[in-house]
Amino acid sequence: MEYLERVRQLNAMLLDEMPEYRSQAGEFPEDAAGQRRLLRSLMNIRPPMPLSPRFLSLQDELLSAERDARGVVDVYSLPSVASDSRLAIWQGDITRLAADAIVDADNSALLGCFCPCHGCIDNVIHSAAGLQLRDECSRLMSAQGHPEPNGRAKLTWGYNLPAKYVLHTVGPVVQGCVTQKNMEELASCYRSCLELASEKGLKSVAFCCISTGEFHFPNREAAEIAVETVTDFLRNDTSVRRVVFDVFKDIDAQIYRELLGEN
């Protein structure tokens, strides 16, 4: 099946489930880019509910092909920083990293971003993993019965990601000046993810820059907390063999290189 036909079939199935969006769907161009953007939008807004085997088969074929086209990066192939062979910096798309787990910076609902095609890391990870990820998160949250507190960690499968698992954590939202509580909660995000990874026998973890985007934690202060927390953890835990600081912006790449002695 050709790419565009697969995308159109997926869009048709989602619009059958959510017919209230048919009028908006008509505003998207009919070419491959326009229809793929429509598909991501529909996937982003779809609430957790049962998924048909046919949809999952087509979705997984599409997402796995796109994953391979982007190129998978083995975290052990990345150059280590001079100060610790277990640490690496990667500037790029975290959904390309083949690690035991990548870290998603979630909101307290832990269901992914519902804003169509939003640029946040939560949206990017859920869009690449597939709708199974939202469903698994929904089951976890239903069993928990309350919003996810800041600074904890949960583990799900990675589905169509190259990473086997996703570690979910909710970072602090900074309003005005950074408070002591903000700093403690951010440190707890990194520590909780590593503790859970170690508990589950995971050897490699890739972190995004938690709380620095929509949650407004200043980049340098967040990086300082991340590096300090991770290096402290690794001093006492030898089971985690690879930690990658994944950065997207040039400013974050520069900050992490300075903190880790790479400049």
Image: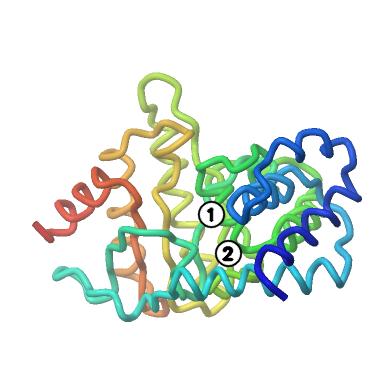
Q: Nearer the viewer, residue 223 or 228?
A: 223
Residue at point 58%, 64% (across, down) = 166
> Left or right: 148 with respect to 57?
left
Residue at point 56%, 69% (across, down) = 66
Sort mark 2 into few (<14), some (14-19) or many (20+) by Cα contacts within 10 Å. many
Question: x, y percentage for residue 177?
Answer: 36, 21
Tell me which corner region of the image, top left, top right, bottom left or bottom right, holds residue 81: bottom left
Mark found first going from the N terminus, 1 or 2: 1
Residue at point 36%, 78% (across, down) = 241
Residue at point 74%, 63% (across, down) = 132
Q: Is residue 251 above or below residue 247?
A: above
> Left or right: 46 with respect to 220?
right
Residue furthest toward the left? 263
Mark 1 and mark 2 residues within 8 Å of each other at the beta carbon: yes
The residue where tag 2 is placed is 166
The residue where tag 1 is placed is 104
